Image: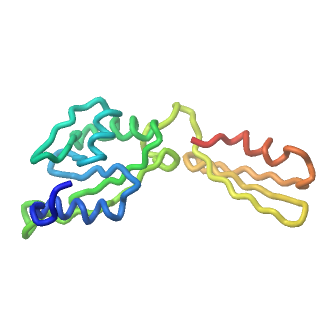
Amino acid sequence: MTKKNSLTPMMEQYFRIKKDHKDTLLFFRLGDFYEMFYEDAKVASAVLEIALTSRQKVPMCGVPYHAVDSYLTKLLKRGFKIAICEQVEDAKKAIGIVKREVVKILTPGTALELEVGEEKENTYIASLFFQNSNWGMAVVDLASGEIKTAQSNAAAPGSINDELIKHPDR
């Protein structure tokens, strides 16, 4: 990693943001591209089959902002969590470095606006409730808004599993 005192203001900003999103691939907006640095760049370049380059020994790769959806979809299909960091002020009006912040976090189960799964694949969230020897379940398809419920006696063998298996996760 680069020494702290030799970082550019933009890379200092990158590290401040990345510190709060360590478990994601950080898509960091720089003009017309989303750039990834260090380990994120190594991982993304391999999965996306794009060039891994470096500047001052910092591994990096990037994708054009206008084509980002196809790259995000490919990463989400492989199970990655992604943080989208945008420029939140006009670069021409910025004093110093352009302000950036994470505006969205995408996961395979929550990226409803992208074509992540098969065309007719559902995205479910479920809630289970247990009381004494009874259980209840509510399942919501996040994409369509459809709600399904079920309830039974917990003593019925396999009944919870039978219901859950009807709603596969991603």
Looking at the picture, tell me which residue is in the foreground, 46 or 90.
46
Q: Residue at x 92, y 48 (%)?
A: 156
Q: Residue at x 35, y 64 (%)?
A: 20
Q: Position of residue 15 (x, y in %)?
A: 24, 61
Residue 64: quarter of image? top left
**Looking at the rendering, in which quadrant would you find the N terminus?**
bottom left
Q: Position of residue 98 (x, y in %)?
A: 14, 63
Q: Is residue 5 above or below residue 164?
A: below
Here the colouring is: rainbow
Looking at the picture, tell me which residue is in the foreground, 108 or 8.
8
Q: Residue at x 25, y 31 (%)?
A: 50
**Looking at the rendering, in which quadrant would you find the C terminus?**
top right
Q: Is residue 169 above or below residue 18?
A: above
Looking at the picture, tell me which residue is in the foreground, 95 or 1.
1
Residue 10: quarter of image? bottom left
On screen, residue 50 versus residue 132, left or right, reads left
Residue 6: quarter of image? bottom left
On screen, residue 30 versus residue 72, left or right, reads left
Q: Residue at x 76, y 55 (%)?
A: 137
Q: Position of residue 125 (x, y in %)?
A: 62, 52
Number of marks in the image?
0
Q: Position of residue 80 (x, y in %)?
A: 43, 44
On screen, residue 117 versus residue 4, left or right, reads right
Q: Residue furthest bottom?
A: 95
Looking at the picture, tell me which residue is in the foreground, 18 or 111.
18
